[in-house]
Structures are given as C-alpha cells and as structure tokens.
C-alpha cells in the first residue's frame, strides 16, 4: 500500500497505530453476528467521519483490534474517543437491549492499548487480521 504523506507548510507526516480496547465487563456480546457486523460498520463509519482509515479491523467477542492510518496531525486520544463514542451510540440505537447490560451508557471500558506501528505496518496488519487464530491457539493451549 503506497504511503500518502500529509504535507502542509513545513510539515510532512504519516501516522499508523495499532489500537485495542475492551467492552465494559468483558461481556462477549460480539459472539452475536448481527451485533458484531453493526459494530464493524459503526467503527468504519466513525473512522471515515474524522478522516481515519482502518487498514485492519478485528472485532472479537469481547474486544476490538484495529490498525488505524491517519494522514493529518490528530491527537490519538481524539481518535480513540471518537471511535469508541460513535460506535457505542450507534450500537445502542440499533440494539436497545444492550442498555440493559450496559447501564449508564458505558459500553466500552475506559482503558485502551495503543502503539505506533512505524515501518512494521504489514506485521501489525497481519496480527490484527489473524486475531481469531491467536485466540483459538490460546484456548487450545488451555485444553
């Protein structure tokens, strides 16, 4: 994938992040395919609204992994805040029954994991792409 550098005055840049966050209480609600698909769509829509490209997205039963590409300066906290906030609002609209499990409107946990990807972008994308395999191996190891 060619890199499209941000360029403005004397600044050039390209930002790529591996992001992960969990559901509040780690409830495996994304085991339901309809909720999972709605979450994926809500995250893609939220990213597009702020000019972020999700190169990879893995919605697991109780958490989300993504590789986000940003072509303009933007605080990482704004990206995480917007993705989590808009996706939770959309999911509560489409699945009102979730409000019974997530009272107070808190859908995602407060914490997040993030790291810059740098030149190893394809490796991070592969890791996110194969999250199901990673979790299956972990389950296999315990059996």
Image (cartoon, helix red, strand yellow):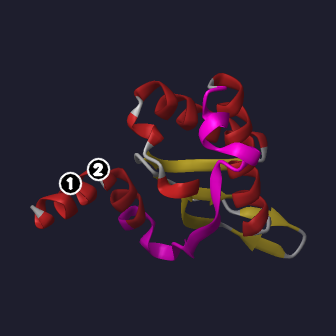
The quadrant of the picture occupied by the C terminus is bottom left
| Nearest to the observer: residue 25 or residue 66 | 25
Q: Residue at x 56, y 36 (%)?
A: 39
Q: Which residue is mark 2?
A: 132
Q: Is residue 67 magenta?
A: no
| Nearest to the observer: residue 19 or residue 56 | 19
Q: Which residue is mark 1?
A: 136
Q: Quadrant of residue 122?
A: bottom left
From the top left corner, tell me how far across and down residue 118 is, in percent.
52, 75
Q: Is residue 22 left or right of residue 47?
A: left
Q: Secondary structure at mark 1?
A: helix
Q: Residue furthest left?
A: 143
Question: Does the residue at mark 2 contact the one at mark 1 (Cβ under 8 Å)?
Answer: yes
**How far is mark 2 from mark 1, CA to CA?**
6 Å
Q: Residue at x 47, y 34 (%)?
A: 36
Residue neighbourhood size for the residue with mark 1, other residues' Cα within 10 Å, grouped as few (<14), some (14–19), many (≥20): few
| Nearest to the observer: residue 71 or residue 140 | 140
Q: Secondary structure at mark 2?
A: helix
Seen in the picture, residue 69 relative to 32 is either above or below; the reply is below
Give the magenta-colored segment's residue range. 96-123
Residue neighbourhood size for the residue with mark 2, other residues' Cα within 10 Å, grouped as few (<14), some (14–19), many (≥20): some
Can residue 125 be seen at all in this image of the molecule?
A: yes
């Amino acid at each position: 994938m060619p890199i499209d550098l941000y360029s403005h005055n004397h600044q050039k840049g390209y930002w790529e992040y591996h992001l992960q966050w969990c559901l509040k209480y780690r409830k495996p609600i994304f085991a339901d395919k309809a909720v999972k698909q709605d979450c994926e769509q809500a995250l893609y829509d939220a990213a597009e609204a702020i000019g972020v490209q999700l190169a990879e997205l893995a919605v697991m039963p109780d958490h989300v992994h993504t590789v986000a590409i940003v072509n303009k300066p933007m605080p990482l906290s704004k990206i995480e805040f917007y993705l989590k906030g808009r996706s939770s609002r959309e999911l509560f609209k489409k699945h009102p029954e979730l409000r019974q499990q997530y009272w107070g409107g808190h859908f995602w946990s407060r914490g997040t994991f993030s790291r810059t990807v740098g030149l190893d972008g394809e490796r991070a994308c592969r890791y996110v792409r194969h999250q199901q395999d990673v979790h299956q191996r972990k389950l296999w190891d315990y059996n």
